[in-house]
Amino acid sequence: MNQYVKCSQCKTRNELKSLFCVECGAKLDMKSVRLDRFSSESGVGSGILRVVLKLVRNILLLAILAAIGLMAWPPSPKGEVGGDVLAWECGNKLARLQEACKRGIGMQSIFEEAEMNAYLAQMIGDEGIPGEEGATSQLANLSDLVLTLYEDTVEVVTTMKLGPVPLSYVVEGRPSVEGDAFVFEIVRASVGHLPMPGPISNFVGGKTSRVFSGMEAEMFILNHLSEVEMKARRIRVTTGGATGDGRRP
């Protein structure tokens, strides 16, 4: 970058090699080079700033691409999935629990992880998830639903078909009964492998709850449980009884 010396008479900038001002012909004072050097260094500073801004922009772009990649990277559900026999057994248990709730009879039942996932797979693959018209339309693209039962939490992985790239929502939470309500406290949530922090996790939780809201018979049972006990690979539920119209006495 060129440097200049400023004429003390007319303030014209002259090239450093000049001895006399090109404008007024006055002899140049070379001490004033330092005054103009600041302009040169300012230009260097601007160049550095542009490089820094470009670097920050590239870093942000890479971060966005990485986030998209993590979201599109499907998780591998750890839950065991059984066959048709286990799906049938799970369906029978649910039918007995539903009848007990309607009659106001207390009842306990243990569900294995493999049979629950077999039941869900059969429901999605053969009949789809019934329910209200709005819920059904929202679940039209549901392709997979897998539960993983841990010692005190449940991981729910739902996979939706969104064009050529399926998108998976992962929610891990603690199921419990508080008063007359079934509660699922979210511990963590992610889209694919991208963690969803704080309030954003509620968005993923909403996606998951919308899936189950279409399962009317199963939600009826959940809303009439008096106790939930978690074990690795299994869950025990107890009904508190209900009136004939499906509400607690």
Image: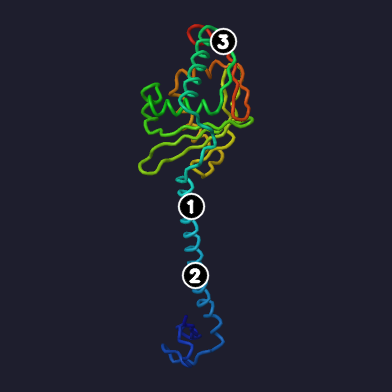
Q: Nearer the viewer, residue 34 or 244?
A: 244
Residues at marks 2 and 1, CA–CA distance in whole angstroms: 30 Å
Q: What residue would you read off at disc 2?
A: 46
Q: Which mark is residue 168?
A: none
Q: Nearer the viewer, mark 1 or mark 3?
A: 3
Asked whether, in this view, residue 231 is left or right of residue 89, the answer is right
Query: Is 155 located above or below residue 36 in the figure?
Result: above
Q: Which mark is residue 241?
A: 3
Instruction: Indicate the secondary structure of the residue bearing disc 2.
Output: helix
Query: Is 90 located above or below residue 2 in the figure?
Result: above
Q: Earlier in the sequence, mark 1 or mark 3?
A: 1
Q: Nearer the viewer, residue 132 or 88?
A: 88
Query: Is 99 located above or below residue 236 in the figure?
Result: above
Instruction: Indicate the secondary structure of the residue bearing disc 1.
Output: helix
Q: Residue at x 52, y 34 (%)?
A: 202
The residue under label 2 is which amino acid type? Ser
Q: Residue at x 54, y 80 (%)?
A: 35
Q: Nearer the viewer, residue 112 or 217?
A: 112
Q: Nearer the viewer, mark 2 or mark 1?
A: 1
Q: What residue would you read off at disc 1?
A: 66
Instruction: Indicate the secondary structure of the residue bearing disc 3.
Output: loop
Q: Position of residue 152 (x, y in %)?
A: 63, 30
Q: Quadrant of the C terminus?
A: top right
The residue under label 1 is which amino acid type? Ala
Q: Position of residue 94 (x, y in %)?
A: 50, 17
Residues at marks 3 and 2, CA–CA distance in whole angstroms: 74 Å
Q: Earlier in the sequence, mark 3 or mark 2?
A: 2
- Total numbered labels placed on residues in the image: 3
Q: Looking at the image, do the residues carrying marks 1 and 3 touch, with CB atoms under 8 Å apart? A: no
Classed neighbour count for the residue bearing mark 2: other residues with Cα under 10 Å, few (<14), some (14–19), many (≥20): few
Q: Looking at the image, do the residues carrying marks 3 and 2 touch, with CB atoms under 8 Å apart? A: no
Q: Earlier in the sequence, mark 2 or mark 1?
A: 2
